[in-house]
Structure formats: structure tokens, C-alpha cells
Image (spheres, helix red, strand yellow):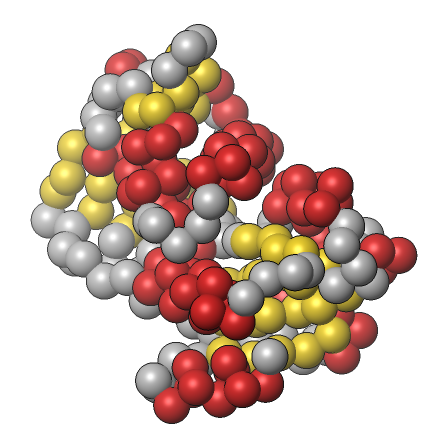
Amino acid sequence: MDQVALALRNEMLQVRIAALHEAIEPPRSGTVMLMWLSVAGWQRVKATLTTWQTVDGSAPGVIVWLRQGAADLREAVLQAGCDDAITEPISMRELASRIRALHRRLHWRGSPHRLRFGNFRLDLETRSLTCGNQVIALTPTEFALLRVLVRAKGKSLTRSELIDAVWGEDTDHETSGRAVDNVVLRLRRKLPNPDVIETVRGIGFRLLPTDSATATP
């Protein structure tokens, strides 16, 4: 794992590797944190992420490595707010691809325009979401998924379309299908009006047409 981190740092990527109990200080925003933890310690993930956001608004990308083959805990870890969750065995090549994919989402830079839907404003330059005067903290994956939904302007998007737009080809569709649902669940919990993200039976998700999205300078 250390060799992977060294190779990625040589590519000028910001990567840190630590056990959960060692990740005390909030990492810089834009850093990919690869945290490994035991099955017994996964409940601390949400508290750690909340502390980081509370202390200084830190918004790192977080990949959790469940080292004891706890595949059944991946969904719980994703719901806790992580951007990705992996279990052994995994090839170093796949691990590096997942880290690169998350790094791209962290450092995505598009048009400096803002996207609006209803009372929400999504700033594509600062990667921030505001509702009135309230700033809503989002993980990089939550931001990326919401950005795709906003740009669809009420069109229904399938889980496969969301996987391709948010995760790309660096993860398997079986895992990502569940991951889409988990990210949508987390977004609904954070938004003042959770019903703005509508489940379209047999298709996927969309933003309600009444909250039509428009891009403005």
C-alpha cells in the first residue's frame, strides 16, 4: 500500500494513508484519505468525518479499507459519509485507480458558473452548496452526484448513468449501484427539502421539475 501511495504522490496527487485511530488532525481539503480499520472500529467513521467538518470545514476524499474481509459493512461505511469502501483482496492497480478517480472528483474544475435549483445554489468553482444563507457541507461524491442531477434539469437518470458520470469506469457496477442509493440517502438527510430528489420507479432518480435548474454567471 505504501508503494501505491508513493507512486501517486510522484504523480503530484495528495494522498494520505492512516489507521482510523491515527487520523486525528483534519486533513487538508483536496486530500484523499485512505483509512484502514478493523470491523470493530467502523462505527467511529461518522464521528471522525463530522469532527473534521466541524473543526475547519475540511473536505477530504475518504476511502475506507476494511481489512478483515467485512464486505457486509461496506454499505454502512458508505452511509456514514465515506466516498468509497473496499475490502480485501484488492489489487494495487485497482486501488490506485480508485484513488485517482476520487482525486479527480476532489479537484474537478469546470465553468465558474453557478447551478440553481429552487432555493439551492451549487457553486462549481468553490464546490459549495448554499440554501439561502445556509452552507451545506457535502463530500466530494455527494457534490459530484448532485451536480449531475442539477445539470439534468429534471430528466430522470438511471443508476448506470449516475455511475458513469460520478464514479467512471474505476469501480464495479454491482458495488456502485448500492453506492448511488447510499449517496442519495445521505443527500436527502442533508437537504432542507429531501423530497427534491425523487426516486423514479424502474429508472433511477431526478430532481423535481418544480425545482428546475438553470446555470447563471
Tell whether 115 sits left or right of 85.
Answer: left
Q: Is residue 184 above or below residue 62?
A: above
- Along the viewing direction, whichever of 24 and 212 lies nearer the viewer: 24
Would you identify the image quadrant in which residue 42 lies? bottom right
Rendered residue at 84%/56% (across/down): 39
Q: Position of residue 161 (x, y in %)?
A: 31, 32
Most distant residue in the top direction:
201
Residue drawn at x 66%, y 40% is 75
Residue 120 shows in the view: no
Q: Position of residue 55 (x, y in %)?
A: 64, 69
In the rendered structure, the answer to whether residue 132 lies left or right of residue 211 reads right
Q: Nearer the viewer, residue 194 or 178?
A: 178
Residue 103, given in percent of the width and then of the height, sits at 39, 67
Residue shown at 68% from the left, 78% from the top: 18
Please name the residue shown 36% across and 31% down the image: 160
Q: Quadrant of the N terminus?
A: bottom right
Q: Is residue 130 above or below residue 39?
A: above
Q: Quadrant of residue 153?
A: top left
